[in-house]
């Protein structure tokens, strides 16, 4: 069986502060940045005065805030509203292509972080926008390209790749263990003694703090870990067994129920290589 993967880290994280605060001072309503990160690199928690569409043309990232965790494989992006503190971890080598929007030009976008599916048209628009000069001509062809891009992001379909993190200390014991070892098979009744609360109390707290039952929350942990590993090329059978499923077919059934398609089809979209 393959070596177990940890959900939030890929070994000792190489930390560095984010250094793009200059983005907030760009004299255009849309700014951009391209950068590459090695596997395991962590951009520590920071925020921008602008909303951000964080897209990886290659690689898988984990974005975390106080409210939860979002796993973002290739061909998806994460929408991050202005002033939301967030950290970014490279689960694999990343080619990041970020766009930053003045809040006034995206008033109808989500007020919370969300993973969105990036169409091939939007992918090309993102890559073209990143290549524009900082002071692009708002009244010329560059401005028209930005206009089309803004039209496209208004209709981005969300993808359920969010794991809400509980705040209660008793649930945190469970949550932190499961995010590091999603295959942990313990039931909520078995967790009760470790967490220092009855299973009835834990059931009530999970519903109140995450909007999910314990079983739903644990399944989401496994789904997100599976996505990260499948995006890295791990075989479906290996991922299924490592995450505690009795068979590949049981895992595929869960995957299809959650995302509406099989793992093979999910990752069969046009490659994100530039």
Image (tube, grey):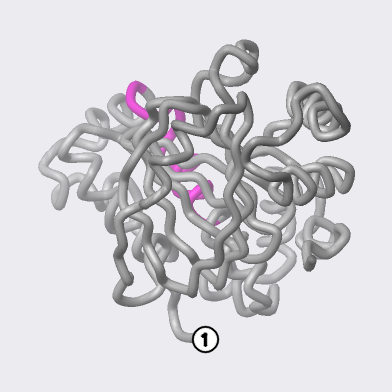
Q: Quadrant of the C terminus?
A: bottom right
Magenta span of residues: 208-222
For image coordinates 62% across by 19% down, the residue present is 109
Residue 81 x/y as whole percent? 49, 26
Where, by quadrant of the figure, is residue 16 drawn? bottom left
- Does residue 244 appear left or right of residue 268 in this picture? left
Mark 1 sits on what residue? 2
For image coordinates 37% across by 56% down, the residue present is 43
For image coordinates 64% across by 49% down, the residue present is 55
Return the residue nearer the eye: 53 or 180.
53
For image coordinates 57% across by 34% down, the residue present is 100
Where, by quadrant of the figure, is residue 252 drawn? bottom right
Q: Main secondary structure of the magenta part?
A: helix
Q: Is residue 214 magenta?
A: yes
Count all numbered tags in the image, as a single digit.
1
Q: Is residue 20 above or below residue 101?
A: below
Residue 164 x/y as whole percent? 42, 36
Circle 1: element type: loop
Where, by quadrant of the figure, is residue 116 drawn? top right
Return the residue nearer the eye: 62 or 98.
98
Residue 258 x/y as whole percent? 68, 43
Return the residue nearer the eye: 184 or 132.
132
Residue 14 x/y as whole percent? 32, 71
């Amino acid at each position: 069986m393959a070596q177990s993967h940890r959900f939030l880290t890929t070994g000792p994280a190489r930390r560095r502060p984010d250094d793009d605060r200059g983005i907030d001072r760009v004299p255009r309503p849309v700014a951009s940045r391209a950068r590459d990160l090695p596997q395991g690199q962590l951009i520590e928690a920071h925020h921008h005065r602008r909303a951000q569409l964080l897209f990886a043309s290659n690689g898988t990232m984990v974005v975390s805030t106080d409210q939860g965790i979002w796993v973002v494989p290739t061909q998806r992006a994460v929408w991050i509203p202005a002033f939301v503190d967030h950290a970014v971890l490279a689960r694999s080598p990343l080619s990041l292509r970020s766009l930053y929007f003045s809040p006034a030009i995206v008033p109808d976008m989500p007020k919370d972080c969300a993973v969105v599916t990036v169409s091939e048209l939007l992918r090309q628009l993102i890559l073209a926008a990143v290549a524009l000069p900082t002071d692009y001509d708002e009244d010329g062809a560059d401005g028209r390209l930005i206009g089309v891009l803004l039209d496209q992001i208004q209709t981005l379909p969300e993808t359920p790749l969010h794991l809400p993190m509980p705040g209660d200390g008793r649930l945190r014991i469970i949550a932190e263990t499961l995010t590091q070892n999603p295959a942990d098979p313990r039931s909520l009744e078995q967790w009760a003694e470790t967490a220092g609360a009855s299973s009835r109390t834990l059931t009530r707290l999970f519903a109140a703090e995450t909007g999910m039952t314990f079983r739903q929350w644990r399944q989401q942990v496994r789904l997100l870990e599976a996505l990260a590993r499948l995006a890295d090329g791990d075989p479906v059978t290996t991922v299924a067994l490592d995450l505690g499923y009795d068979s590949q077919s049981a895992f595929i059934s869960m995957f299809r129920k959650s995302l509406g398609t099989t793992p093979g089809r999910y990752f069969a979209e046009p490659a994100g290589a530039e």
